[in-house]
Image (cartoon, coloured by chain):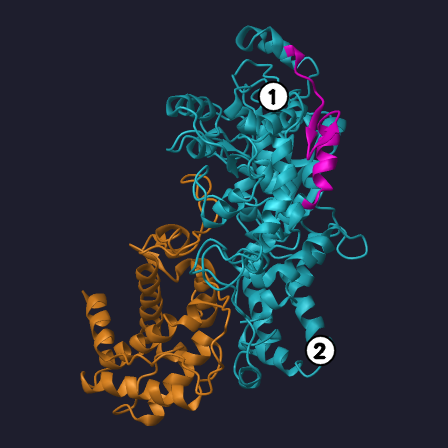
Amino acid sequence: MRILALIALIAALASPALPARAQEAAPASPDPRIKFKDGERYLRDLAESLEIPREEICLELSRYDCADKAFRIVLGGVDPYDIRIMQPLDQASLASPIAFDRVALQVCSGRVARDRADPAASILFKRAAGRPDAAWRDALADRLYDRILRRSPDAGERQRMAGFLEGLEARSDRSAKAQADQTILACFALASSAEAAFY
Amino acid sequence: MTTGRARGVSGLRAWAAVIAAAGLSVVAAGLAGPGGEAVAKPPASMEFCKIYPTAHVCAASPVVNCTTCHTVPPARNLYGEQVSANLAPGAARPLSDADYIAALPAALRAVEALDADGDGVSNLAELVAGSQPELASSRPTSARCTPGQARNAAGGRWNTCGYDPAHAYRKVTLDVCGRSPTRAETEAFRRLLPSESAWRGALADRLDQCLRTPYWLGVNGVLWNLANAKINPVDSIKAGPRAGSIPLADYEWDYNLFAWLNTGDRDVRGLLTGQDFVKRVSDSPPAFEPVPEDGMRALRQAGQTVPRDKRAGMITTRWFTTVNTMFTPIPRTTAAAAYRQYLGLDLARMQGLHPAVSEPADYDSKGVAAPACAVCHSTLDPLTYPFTRYDGIIRNNYNPNRLKNFVRTDGARVVEAPEAGEIFGQKVANLMEWSQVAANSDAFAQKVVWDYWKLMVGREPGPADQTEFTLMWKGLKAQDKFNYRTERMLHALVLTEAYGRP
């Protein structure tokens, strides 16, 4: 239920232009060749960036690795031995974006849970001393871009992220849990962006 | 291509049944279409590229698909109808293959300036560019930017109008190492961009590092998975570690051989001509070494029992003959698999047809000499004879007298099947010669590069890729370029615009 509530909240608040839109965008490629990162590469990247062991970063039912077991085929993997899928699917399946979002949300939730459990070693979530202010929001945006997209946000991206966080804050209280939820959703917004999923 | 009309539907259905029984159901589906007689002309798929070697459809393979002229053979598409109308007009139908081939160039030339689909682009321009002359919605596209776009792109985060070294660096790290570059690595690379030699060196170094990682070379790594469709693993009959319920052979050795031949300073033609049997000594870091001949016996079901001088790389391993030849005297499936997996020619799609004179002889009495079957079997059967001396399940050995074992089940004539055969219209005495011809063919080089292209670029070579793709496969063959070393080819591939342009 908590996950559903989080998804409903982000759907209500997310601006269409929120994630990773460059301020000085290059012209659209006339012949784009981007590739899906696939589940394994995606989780390896996040495991490294968010400092979570690869084998712990995403487990469905606390048992089945998201990329290797639970969503192996829909996230671009193969299984030549049992189900005879020799190469990644040429077209993403209908379930692929659902699985991808689910993985992104689980990873972000897991990182923030670790941060709350051990604030001294936190990576993403750092509780504001008082009411979250612009500095807190900018610092969070910087951390998220640095960890997830491995770069700094430009001014426009930072501004949109701040607006997103302010929108979330207006609909929640000032508790640590509310701040953590904001962090999860902001993390999810970037971790499920095209820039994080494709290359 | 088809000519003529009017053979009974019931006769076609009977042919279709025979073809389907021979495992060529796709061809059968095409021939048994409605509307009476149609005689397929598979030689057209090869002749077309002889006439139009620069056509886009001929860049990746020396044969074109039937759909160049047909919807579902024998029904023609708009372009095929135009060609047909200009093919030896007035001559009696059906045309013989020889008459057909003689008339085809003039028919194709006659329709070059026409516009079958009415999209404003001539048939010839569409064929060269890679769009479909029979489909109005398919027109040549330009991937070029305007000068203004190019200026903006050069100053953007990604250069979408040209080769972007930073984009290529990220792609190489993800494709081959399995991870994104760290922020520090990216920033360090970007600092090299003012010096082309510096960034080229850094890109090459990154590729070399990644080519030795378990992600690329390891069990279930990228190279391993590149071989899946060639090796066709089945766990239920796997022998060796993690054996299945009916252990017959171990595919892991095939994966090892594939990875070994695709790394380092090794000739990738060994996939068809190699005689080594390779052991994975370690998976992290990945390391391989050939198994000494005197160590083979200890490997039992996993080992290679074919004598060294009778081995032909991946196509005589215990696994390959077990899953393809099984118990068949004339193992057409084996030859067709080798043709498809290593030369990119799928006989079920009527690709790579080179009919041999007086074939198929039908030594095993399977009815393949029936006209509809002979269309493909006149190529497939002589392609198969060199495989007839290699046992499949259980024995997995070379046996010059092997066919004597099949007289009771396949008739007395089966022993007359020769070991000599034909590939690409060239006569060969045995599988050793077969594999040499295959390994030195354009089709082999194209297939090797095609596999890597699809893997690295992320899609099949398209119209805009024709020049670079051709450079890659011709370079693979050239002694002074890549000389059949796939890692050298990869170093060039990551410098193509197809790879490095976002």
Q: Position of residue B400 (x, y in %)?
A: 71, 16
Q: Position of residue B77 (x, y in %)?
A: 45, 47
Residue B431 highlighted magenta (yes or no): yes
Q: Earlier in the sequence, mark 1 or mark 2?
A: 2
Q: Amino acid at mark 2?
A: Glu
Pick the residue in front: A152 or B274: B274
Secondary structure under tag 1 reads: loop
The chain that appears cyan in the image is: B
Q: Which is more foreground, mark 1 or mark 2?
A: 1
Query: What residue does disc 1 label?
Result: B360
Residue B76's image quarter?
A: top left
Q: Chain of mark 1?
A: B
Q: Position of residue B289 (x, y in %)?
A: 71, 42
**Boundaries of the magenta span:** B415-442
Query: From the viewer's perspective, is residue B338 above or below residue B169?
Result: above
Q: What color is chain A drawn in?
A: orange
Query: What residue does disc 2 label?
Result: B196
Quadrant of the snapshot with the N terminus of chain A: bottom left
Secondary structure under tag 2 reads: helix
Pick the residue in front: B43 or B431: B43
Tell me the CA gap for discs 1 and 2. Answer: 58 Å
